[in-house]
Amino acid sequence: MNSRIAVVPGSFDPPTLGHLDVIRRAARLYDTLHVLVVHNPGKEAMLPIAQRLSLLEQSIADSDIDGEVVVASWSMGLLVDYVTDVGAGVLVKGIRSQVDVAYETPMAIVNRHLADVETVFLLPDPAHALVSSSLVRQVASLGGDVSPFVPAAVARFLDTGARGI
Ligand code: PNS
């Protein structure tokens, strides 16, 4: 377990500017950051995991985020198994509101029981406080402009209709 290596997990369906903001802040705090696309069994997905991975890689490459950032996906079991495999000691989650605290706290406690892993909550820029992937999915599916809420690579992808909806 290494507290200098952290994992930022999420559905990233699709990645938003809020996600990028949390990744940027976490990359400043840790030596190595794994940004991990994880299937959330509780949510119906819009994009295949490989597409989310590709959009995250492009969005991070286009950004000013530096440091050692690894983008990967995980569908082999528990999130903490990936965390343990890469020798990380910390999970990082973005918290926009009390709703996120209520959603994230049980997962943080369960993950700490499952493995020796702490969860660190970061506060994103309030400019992104109302942005969520689920709202972006809804606006995109109804033909609206999502470019204020997502990285340029994601806006281009959703705008071209390449997602096939
Ligand atoms: O972006 P999301 O959908 O809020 O991310 C939630 C996610 C994918 C991080 C969460 O569902 C998760 O950790 N899934 C992995 C399965 C797991 O390990 N569950 C047990 C501990 S909560």
Image: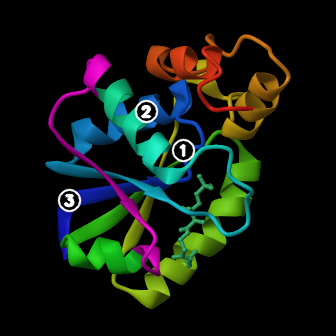
Label 2 residue SS: helix
User: Any atom of ligand 1 within 8 Å of the CB at mark 1?
Assistant: yes
**Residue stretch rendered in magenta on the structure:** 61-79
Please name which of the two marks, 2 or 1, marks the residue nearer to the observer: 2
Q: What amino acid type is highlighted by mark number 2?
A: Leu
On residue 123, which mark appears? Answer: none
- Image coordinates of residue 81 in percent, x first then y, are 35, 80
* Quadrant position of ligand 1: bottom right
What amino acid is found at the position of numbered circle 1 in the picture?
Phe
**Helix, strand, or loop for circle 1?**
loop
Q: Secondary structure at mark 3?
A: strand
Check residue 5 in the rendering and tell me which mark sits there, or answer none: 3
Residue 48 image position (x, y, % from top left): 55, 49
Q: Circle 2 is placed at which residue position?
A: 55
Answer whether labels 2 and 1 touch (C-beta < 8 Å). Answer: yes
Quadrant of the frame with the N terminus? bottom left
Q: Quadrant of residue 127?
A: top right
Tell me which corner region of the image, top left, top right, bottom left or bottom right, holds residue 47: top right
Q: Which mark is residue 12?
A: 1
Tell me where residue 151 appears, x and y as whole percent. 48, 20
